[in-house]
Amino acid sequence: MNRTRPAPMRCMPRATLAIALALAGVATAVEAAPVGVEWRDSLTWQGHQARMRSDGDGWRLHPGAADAKDIAIPAQALRSRTASPLFDGLFALAQKELTQAQVESISDNAYDNGRPIPCPCFETGEKWRYVWTRDLSFAADLALARLRPERTRAALRFKLSDLRAGAPQGTYVVQDTGSGGSWPISSDRVVWFLAARGLLDAPAADADAGRFRDEVWAALTDTLAQDRQYVFDADTGLYRGETSFLDWREQSYPRWTSDDVAFLAQSFALSTNVLHYEALRLGERMARERGDARADKYARQAKALAAQIERRFWREDRGLYMSYIGTAAHPVPFEAYDLLGLSLLVESGIAPPHRARRALANYPMLDSGSPVIWPQQPGIAIYHNRAIWPFVSAYALRAARTTNDAARIDHEIRSILRGAALAGSNMENYELRTQAVHVDDGALSGPVVNSPRQLWSVAGYLQMVMEGVFGLQADGSVEPKIPTSLVPLLFGDGDRITLSMPGREVVIVRPPAGEGDLLVHGPVERDGERETVYLVPLRGAPVVEPSHLDAAAFAPASPEAPAMKRDGAHWRIDVPAGQNLYVDGVLKTRASPMASSARLDVRDARQCASLTRVHDGIESLHSPTRCVGAEVLIDGDWPRTWRAPRAGRYALSVNFRNTHGPINTGITAAVKTLVVQCDGMAEQTGTLVMPHGAALQRSSPVVVEVPKGATCRLALRDGINMSYLRHNARYTGGTGGVDGPLNSADIGALHAMPVNAAPINQKASP
């Protein structure tokens, strides 16, 4: 159920892999990537060498310190013919590993107690015999939908479900992993549609493809509606929830979220919002194809969401898009950036071209590869932190092609190739500096979870060859963008490279002499099944300055929450030396060498504050937030009655404790609809999200308008969580599965806090 976010100490034994490289310790320096002849049949990296040679109808790989591996060429395989046996042999390896991932049943201890479940689909990796929505979808988007469309459809179908209880009935995508009880704390299940869109253009005569289109449309409309109701925040115009893929809290979020995930449920992530944007665009496309009136609604929602993404996540001082920002109550910027979110944003077209180029160039990298997050977090074991993930590198390669960034194209291709060559498999992740599958660093050793032939890494290698080098696009067109720095590796002394596929052959011909940084498609010749593309230098490409940030740099640790002390008509906040103070989402006092204090007027309306620490020009992640205001506690049985002391907007939230599952997984986050009926006003509703956790927590708030002196009746209705899905009737990893849906928490006092008379920004349309 939760393969990517176990507690570090419990998972340490899984980090010792059979093919682990003998790379001990963290290197203090990185070697420059060798060019030319060495990369053709061998490469050397930090004292380890990988070699490849042709072996009759296959290849023989000597990967670093691991045993030699024979690579037979699978039947109906695609074949690349370049000057590099290493490049071509690893392409064959990726196809072999894709074949190994094709199974007729899957299993995981969290489902049916580990018994096999029939599914003609893909398993996630050598160590992971199940199918997860996120892994499958990114892998399908990168390569599987193109190479194995029938099996990809079957696998995607496995992640759809109707409801066994609750309403409205429909078809929904399963959020099968996530913090604090899964959805809606983690809300990136819409990544499923990123995969599905690559399967919608199958020939009309394919009956199964036609059925699949209908299933996509049903799941799309129902899932979009459900997320709009429970995850969308009208005040900010964004969707709430955890970052996609980066779902092990303390790896990339403040350390204090390891025990308190309520913040994740209320914050806003770049990657998750871009995925919702892409789902809305697909909704618009499919609605127009079907003549459905919802097309204009989806178009408006996508346009509004794109505007808010561009506005809220851009950080001008860094020239980067933030990985996530704070809550609607305290929408602070974070010194947190992630490569997947940025790459998805660039590819989506939301970012203006000049910002897309600048942001991708500013994202730091080492010769080993690009870190999945920046800056690195102190005291955290290697996993997302201090790591390279090949599938993310593949998305960065796509983004670099979009911005014509020749240096980054070269960089990501070499990183993907080197990792597979040295490990002898397409591993899930690598340590950042060494690109090793495991590094001993005491309690911080890692990556703490890893597996050979991880599905999205396999797909990343395949994508790197087919799209990254040969330029094969989803629509079948060929648009190569090859840096001149890769010409010696790929072409050697020859003038052409070839990709052979069943019924088609693509030949790329380089110009006589290198000119410029990037070679792109020029004239095209077609002769039967053969398509020959002649490369030409890209003229007038924008100059992009590379990043000067240290990719391995650490952020300082987050400080403690600010103390807000009443001092007559003011609140006094002591600010330690070297710390920034933020109030209501805005920087109020900048870090200085001396301690200081700030004062806020005492007001009825809510005021929220947090602190960050600054060291060597890098800002820490935020402390916990503290809020003050004229708060009222409302106790008693439900429904509860409350008489507002004055007119205005109030944030209503509840104390709760949800002990129905562990804090890092499960399907029983409690989701309730708060119904507010005040005298003389229409009914108002909103969502209270209550994630797993042993401690007493505060739910997400619902903001309502209340007239002066009105008496309001407050009631709760059941919402929806993942335990309601029929798919989870087989869930045996915790509560809410075989024992039936579970959507409850121990709910205490209700808090009513007056907030500003108007939202921080204009409300978005529903």
Image (cartoon, rainbow, N blue to C red):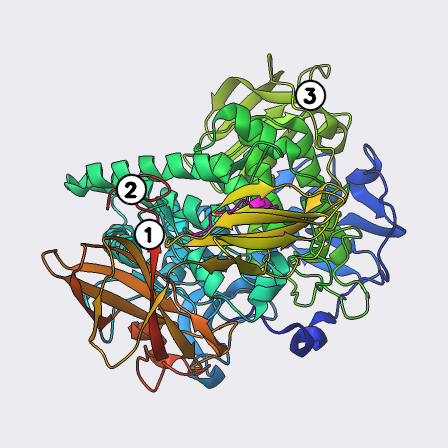
Is 285 on the left-hand or right-hand side of 61? left
Res. 140 in view:
no
Pointer 1: residues within 10 angstroms few (<14), some, or many (20+)?
A: many
Residue at numbered disc 3 = 517
Question: What residue is at 55 percent from the left and 22 percent from the top?
Answer: 533
Q: Which residue is mark 2?
A: 764
Residue 538 inside the magenta-drawn segment: no
The rendered magenta stretch, by its main secondary structure, is classed as: loop
Viewer-closest of 657 and 608: 608
Q: Nearer the viewer, mark 1 or mark 2?
A: 2
Looking at the picture, does residue 729 appear above or below residue 558?
below
Q: Amino acid at mark 1?
A: Phe
* Numbered circle sitting on residue 232: 1
Task: Label 1: state its secondary structure.
Answer: strand
Q: Position of residue 344 (x, y in %)?
A: 49, 42
- Residue 248's spot in the image, x, y percent? 57, 64
- Residue 703 is tagged as none
Asked if the residues shown at circle 1 and circle 2 are in contact, with their CB atoms under 8 angstroms apart, the answer is: yes
Label 2 to label 3, Cα distance in Å?
Answer: 44 Å
